[in-house]
Image (cartoon, rainbow, N blue to C red):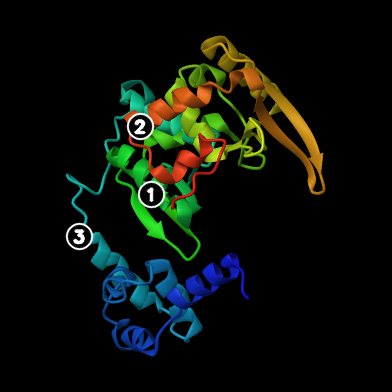
């Protein structure tokens, strides 16, 4: 008998398999439609999936095709309305909820990158597995001032915002530039404004609660050791906790985590209350509960 994971994998493969009629839609319409318009005709597949499929079936855009598509898309931009975010925003005048989600996400799974080197500013991106899709939509709603779009792929759901100077600022402060462009620095002056809500967002992104014990941890790979130690001290002073940085060896190398000792476990109750207040999706509540709840 196939396992539950094998059945789920087979289901996802079948769900994303191209049909002959979908391929025919691409073949008959690609010359006069953009990938966004093709995605409206084939709603089961994203723009990126359509672009990949076009290449697989031998359809390649000429310079003329690329040029008219760019001009066509450009004609729909309303520069005074929805296609631009407020370029005068900065972290100081953000709503605190938005600020905390950004800071918690930057410590966690969020990143800032550029779609093109020619763009002046960066954008914010974050993705999670399909089981946590509601969490991605929740973050997108919080960050609505940055006009995020949702991308649904075969195995994950992502949010991608418009570019904004705020994300360029975060890039310069959280990334090790220009050596390897990896997220590794923790700007303590900036992160010092984190509250329990922002700390919870980091935990929801990278945290883990052992189901056999109250072993509460947050993954912290990639961060500078001294910065991470300073952040741990800041968290302890600010929230009366006793976290510490722990390095554990495993078969793939050394893992670095922020550990909460047993006496700090009550923070889960605070986070759970905060989660109810801010309507965190139920798909994330397993991170607050020691025992897995089964429905009957």
Closer to us: 211 or 157? 211
Q: Is residue 47 depicted above or below 163 in this figure?
A: below
* Residue 121 in the image, given as x and y percentages of width and height: 41, 41
The residue identified by callout 2 is: 276
Gap between marks 2 and 3, in whole Å?
40 Å
Closer to the observer: label 3 or label 1?
1
Relative side of 277 to 283, left or right:
left
User: Mark 3–mark 1 contact, CB under 8 Å?
Assistant: no
**Quick one: label 1, few (<14), some, or many (20+) residues within 10 Å?**
some
Reading the chain from its start, which is encountered first: label 3 or label 1?
3
The percent position of residue 31, horizontal first and vertical second, equals 31, 82
Frontmost residue, 106 versus 17: 17
What residue appears at the point 35 percent right and 77 percent down from the top-left corner?
64
Write the residue at 30% across / 75% down. 38
* Callout 2 secondary element: helix
Cα separation between marks 3 and 1: 30 Å
Residue closest to the eye, 294 or 245: 294
Query: Which of label 2 and label 3 is nearer to you?
Result: 2
- Left or right, residue 170 beside residue 240: left
Mark 1–mark 2 CB contact (< 8 Å): no
Q: State the residue position of label 3.
A: 76
- Secondary structure at numbered mark 3: loop
Mark 3 or mark 2, which is nearer the start of the sequence?
A: 3
| Disc assigned to residue 134 | 1
In terms of sequence position, does the residue under pointer 1 or pointer 2 come before the other? 1
């Amino acid at each position: 008998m196939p396992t539950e994971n094998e059945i789920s994998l087979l289901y996802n493969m079948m769900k994303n398999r191209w049909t002959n009629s979908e391929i025919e839609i691409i073949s008959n319409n690609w010359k006069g439609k953009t990938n966004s318009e093709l995605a409206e005709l084939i709603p089961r597949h994203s723009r990126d999936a359509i672009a990949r499929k076009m290449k697989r079936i031998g359809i390649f855009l000429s310079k003329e095709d690329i040029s008219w598509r760019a001009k066509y898309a450009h004609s729909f931009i309303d520069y005074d309305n929805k296609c631009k975010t407020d370029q005068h925003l900065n972290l100081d005048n953000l709503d605190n909820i938005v600020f905390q989600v950004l800071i918690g996400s930057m410590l966690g799974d969020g990143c800032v990158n550029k779609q093109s080197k020619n763009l002046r500013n960066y954008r914010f991106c974050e993705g999670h597995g399909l089981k946590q899709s509601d969490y991605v939509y929740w973050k997108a709603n919080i960050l609505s001032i940055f006009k995020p779009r949702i991308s649904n792929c075969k195995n994950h759901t992502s949010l991608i915002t418009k570019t904004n100077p705020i994300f360029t600022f975060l890039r310069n402060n959280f990334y090790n530039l220009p050596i390897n462009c990896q997220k590794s620095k923790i700007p303590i002056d900036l992160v010092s404004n984190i509250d329990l809500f922002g700390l919870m967002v980091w935990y929801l992104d990278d945290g883990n609660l052992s189901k056999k014990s109250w072993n509460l941890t947050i993954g912290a790979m990639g961060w500078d050791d001294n910065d991470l130690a300073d952040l741990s001290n800041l968290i302890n002073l600010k929230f009366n906790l006793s976290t510490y940085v722990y390095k554990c060896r495993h078969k793939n190398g050394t893992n670095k985590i922020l550990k909460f000792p047993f006496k700090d476990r009550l923070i889960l109750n605070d986070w759970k209350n905060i989660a109810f207040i801010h309507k965190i999706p139920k798909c994330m509540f397993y991170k607050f509960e020691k025992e897995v709840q089964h429905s009957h």
